[in-house]
Image (cartoon, grey):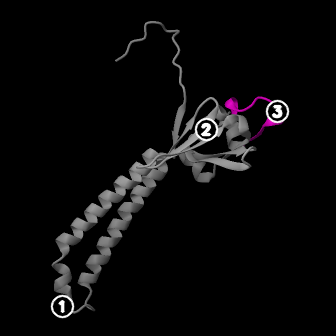
């Protein structure tokens, strides 16, 4: 464990990484498990169904092992894909820019200068308030587009960080804060 000799030492952070809320990763993994259960239930209900002739029923039953191997490998592959997609898609907040990185094999980067941002807005619904996620929208006046930090965890914290990094002139920016965020600050 590292020891700090001087209590007044400061830690400097160059940028902040933000991911989509882990709530959505868990939700996707639960849905993936439910789909696997439904596939297995459909397979066995077709075998136990009396409408299928017994000859065809025996053929279907002979593929039990291969069916489960395919189901297991498919579920593992989809689980790895969902987790890797969550890990490789993130936002970076730098002192002068917001970047959006995505891509498992090929990395795509979108860079937006904070000096070009006109307004910042936070959106957090009922479940977002309960589970701690929301969307931060920034308006880029130069490109005339909205940039969204979509369903990130703890959006109020990052809203205040982005707000503090935006241009300081009141004529150059607009801040939109919903009631919940203003009550917590």
Residue at the spot 20% in from the left edge and 88% down from the top edge: 56
Q: Which residue is mark 3?
A: 170
Residue 61 locus on image (x, y percent): 18, 79
Mark 2 or mark 1, whichever is nearer to me: 2
- Closer to the chain start, of discs 1 and 3, is 1
Mark 1 or mark 3, whichever is nearer to me: 3
Crowding at dot 3, Cα within 10 Å, few <14 / some 14-19 / many 20+, comes out as few
Is residue 77 magenta-colored? Answer: no
Cα separation, mark 2 vs mark 3, equals: 20 Å
Rendered image quadrant of residue 4: top left
Residue 161 locus on image (x, y percent): 64, 32
Q: Is residue 1 above or below residue 140?
A: above
Q: Which numbered dot is residue 5?
A: none
Q: Which residues are magenta?
A: 163-177
**SS category of the residue bearing label 2:** strand
Residue at the spot 72% in from the left edge and 39% down from the top edge: 117
Cα separation, mark 2 vs mark 1, equals: 63 Å
Rendered image quadrant of residue 28: bottom left
Tell me if 16 is positioned left or right of 60 in this view. right
Residue at the spot 20% in from the left edge and 81% down from the top edge: 60
Task: Look at the numbered discs 1 and 3 and tell me whether their residues touch, using CB distance below 8 Å.
Answer: no
- Closer to the chain start, of discs 2 and 3, is 2
The quadrant of the picture occupied by the N terminus is: top left
Crowding at dot 2, Cα within 10 Å, few <14 / some 14-19 / many 20+, comes out as many
Task: Look at the numbered discs 2 and 1 and tell me whether their residues touch, using CB distance below 8 Å.
Answer: no
Q: Which residue is mark 1?
A: 54
Q: Which residue is mark 2?
A: 98
């Amino acid at each position: 464990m590292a020891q700090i000799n001087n209590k007044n030492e400061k830690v400097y952070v160059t940028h902040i990484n933000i991911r989509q809320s882990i709530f959505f990763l868990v939700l996707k993994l639960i849905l993936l498990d439910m789909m696997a259960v439904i596939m297995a239930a459909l397979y066995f209900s077709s075998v136990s169904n009396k409408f299928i002739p017994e000859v065809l029923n025996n053929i279907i039953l002979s593929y039990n092992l291969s069916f489960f191997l395919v189901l297991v490998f498919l579920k593992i592959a989809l689980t790895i894909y969902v987790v890797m997609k969550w890990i490789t898609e993130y936002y970076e907040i730098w002192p002068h820019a917001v970047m959006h990185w995505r891509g498992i094999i090929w990395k795509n980067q979108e860079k937006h200068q904070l000096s070009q941002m006109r307004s910042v807005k936070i959106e957090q619904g009922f479940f977002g308030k309960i589970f701690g996620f929301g969307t931060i929208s920034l308006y880029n006046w130069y490109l005339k587009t909205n940039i969204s930090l979509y369903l990130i965890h703890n959006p109020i914290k990052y809203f205040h960080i982005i707000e503090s990094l935006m241009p300081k002139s009141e004529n150059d920016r607009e801040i939109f804060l919903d009631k919940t965020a203003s009550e917590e600050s």
